[in-house]
């Protein structure tokens, strides 16, 4: 190599300080040693880098042009050095994570908190995704993994349930249904019902539960996000069947959560691509998630 990293370092120091004396202080190296390196650099490159004017080093046009390239290279070397130092304190990089809104405030929030405490050098990009878009996000590598409130069926996905939950009933505080120990679906049908839209997974789950109970589902409002159902219930618009995770993770002063007589299970699941190469930090997050709840 005609222009070694050491020569670059010395050349840069002289350009920054304007003298051999200044460079020696910056690099903690003797002035004669630096003078020899500068002279050798000019000889091997075949360039005059500095004009000696009254004991001072004045950079030539070639030196100015070379400095711009050397400084860029030096900044990259510093980034590599920082990266190497970071490896000593633990893994670094980025984890792209998606999850169902129902799990974002409770289960996943607690897992992310534990994850960043354990891996402070790994940045987490967290996004909310509805079930109908989750498979595409994972398979297109938009995210490294997803956490879904319900299992997703797809031949190119690995879906692993990791906990259990159930659907519950939410009603305005002091509602007539609060007198019951358990609310049946037939009880819900007697009041204005706020339900998930039939085009989404929660809507299909609700419709199937009403059909199994032989009860006609007549909604006054269809929603796509469970939090909106709770907001509408709090405002007195009606009653709703929602997942326990959303109901438990938010404080709704005007809402009461009641158990359903019918058991409608939920199985939150970890979703990964079948083509996952294992190069991301997904496995680390999964380990933390499984120990969080």
Image (spheres, rainbow, N blue to C red):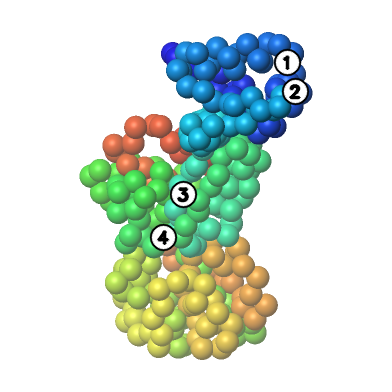
Mark 4 to mark 2 CA distance (whole Å): 60 Å
Mark 1 to mark 2 CA distance (whole Å): 6 Å
Crowdedness near tag 1: few (<14), some (14–19) or many (≥20) residues, C-alpha within 10 Å: some
Is residue 134 toward the left or the right of residue 168 in the image? Answer: left
Front residue of 74/279: it is: 74
The quarter in which the C terminus is drawn is: top right
Q: Is residue 247 above or below residue 188?
A: above
Dot 1 and dot 2 residues touching (CB under 8 Å):
yes
The residue tagged 1 is: 31
The disc label shown at residue 170, or none: none
Q: Nearer the viewer, mark 3 or mark 2?
A: 2
Indicate the position of residue 41 as horizontal and vertical percent values: 53, 16
Kindly identify the residue that appears in the image at 30 percent across and 47 percent down.
139
Kindly identify the residue that appears in the image at 62 percent across and 43 percent down.
116
The residue tagged 3 is: 97
Displayed quadrant of residue 265: bottom left
Q: Is residue 82 above or below residue 229?
A: above
Mark 1 to mark 3 CA distance (whole Å): 54 Å
The residue tagged 4 is: 129
Q: Nearer the viewer, mark 4 or mark 2?
A: 2
């Amino acid at each position: 190599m005609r222009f070694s990293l050491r020569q670059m370092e010395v050349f840069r120091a002289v350009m920054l300080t304007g003298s051999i004396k200044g460079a020696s202080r910056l690099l903690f190296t003797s002035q004669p040693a630096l003078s020899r390196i500068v002279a050798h650099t000019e000889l091997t490159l075949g360039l005059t880098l500095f004009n000696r004017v009254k004991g001072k080093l004045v950079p030539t046009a070639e030196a100015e042009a070379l400095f711009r390239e050397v400084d860029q290279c030096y900044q990259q070397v510093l980034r590599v050095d920082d990266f190497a130092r970071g490896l000593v304190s633990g893994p670094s990089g980025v984890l792209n994570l998606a999850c169902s809104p129902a799990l974002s405030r409770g289960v996943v929030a607690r897992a992310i908190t534990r994850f960043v405490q354990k891996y402070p050098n790994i940045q987490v990009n967290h996004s909310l995704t509805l079930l109908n878009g989750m498979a595409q996000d994972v398979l297109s590598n938009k995210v490294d993994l997803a956490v879904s409130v319900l299992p997703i069926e797809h031949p190119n996905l690995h879906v692993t349930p990791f906990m259990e939950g159930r659907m519950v009933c939410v009603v305005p505080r002091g509602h007539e249904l609060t007198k019951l120990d358990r609310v049946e679906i037939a009880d819900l049908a007697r009041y204005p019902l706020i339900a998930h839209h039939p085009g989404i997974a929660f809507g299909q789950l609700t419709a199937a539960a009403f059909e199994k109970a032989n009860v006609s589902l007549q909604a006054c409002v269809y929603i796509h996000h469970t939090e909106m159902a709770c907001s509408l219930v709090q405002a007195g618009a009606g009653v709703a069947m929602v997942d326990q995770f959303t109901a438990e993770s938010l404080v709704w002063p005007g809402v009461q959560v009641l158990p359903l007589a019918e058991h409608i299970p939920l199985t939150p699941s970890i979703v990964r691509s079948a083509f996952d190469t294992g190069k991301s930090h997904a496995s680390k997050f999964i380990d933390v998630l499984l120990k969080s709840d």
